[in-house]
Amino acid sequence: MKRIALFPGSFDPFTKGHEDIVIRGSLLFDEVIIGIGQNSQKQRFFPIEVMINCINEAFKDYPNVKVDSFVGLTATFAEKINAKYLLRGLRNTTDFEYENSIAQINKNIYPNLETVLFITSPELAYISSTIVRDIHKWGQNVDKYLPYKLPT
């Protein structure tokens, strides 16, 4: 059976920290699907279509990495695409507390779903989509935080 992992997030934007998790996950799983969720509590800065194109470009040399978008619960989407694993990155203990709670709820909704947590590579742990987005909003160059060039 194919081992499919879902790497969900709003990815607004998708950073080099996210890229690192996906690349490492692509070595463990037959397929990694980057799922861009629409979070009802967040207003997107970068349109989903732009992120899909940028992420596809970043992973053009990784045939086992795909990008999709979804609305609704992550666990429901994982079940729909037959993913048995959720791939998540941890930068710090705060992330762990949050991911632990979410993993338990997801397991309750979709019992066949296992959450796999990767510790973020130390040189990338400081990168946050929120901070990168704010830097970009104020006109600063964010190229060093992203695995692709933003369209102009």
Image: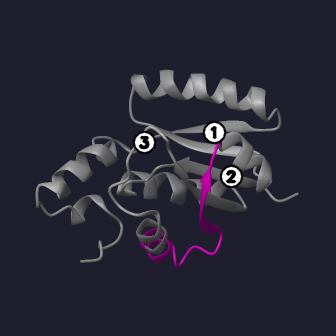
Q: Amino acid at mark 2?
A: Ala
Q: Quadrant of residue 57?
A: bottom left
In three-dimensional space, the C-alpha distance between marks 1 and 3, rounded to whole angstroms, equals: 13 Å
Q: Is residue 56 magenta?
A: yes
- The reply to whether callout 2 and callout 1 are in contact (CB within 8 Å) is yes
Q: Is residue 76 magenta?
A: no
The image position of residue 105, as x and y in percent, is 68, 26
Q: Element at badge 1? A: strand
For badge 3, the amino acid type reads Thr
Q: CA distance from mark 3 to mark 2?
A: 17 Å
Q: Give the residue at mark 3.
A: 120
Residue displayed at 32% across by 56% down: 45
The x and y percentages for residue 49 are 47, 70
Q: Secondary structure at mark 2?
A: strand
Residue corresponding to mark 1 = 116
Residue 5: give its label.
2
User: How many other residues sit within 10 Å of disc 1, few (<14), some (14-19) or many (≥20)?
Assistant: some
Label 1 sits on what residue type? Val
Tag of residue 81: none
Is residue 148 found left or right of 63 in the rendered image?
left
Where 84 sits versus 64, above or below? above
Q: Is residue 74 above or below residue 1?
A: above
* Other-residue count near label 2 (Cα within 10 Å), few / some / many at <14 / 14–19 / ≥20: many
| Magenta range | 54-73
Q: Secondary structure at mark 3?
A: loop
Residue 120 seen in the figure: yes
Q: Residue 125: percent from the left, percent from the top?
A: 33, 41
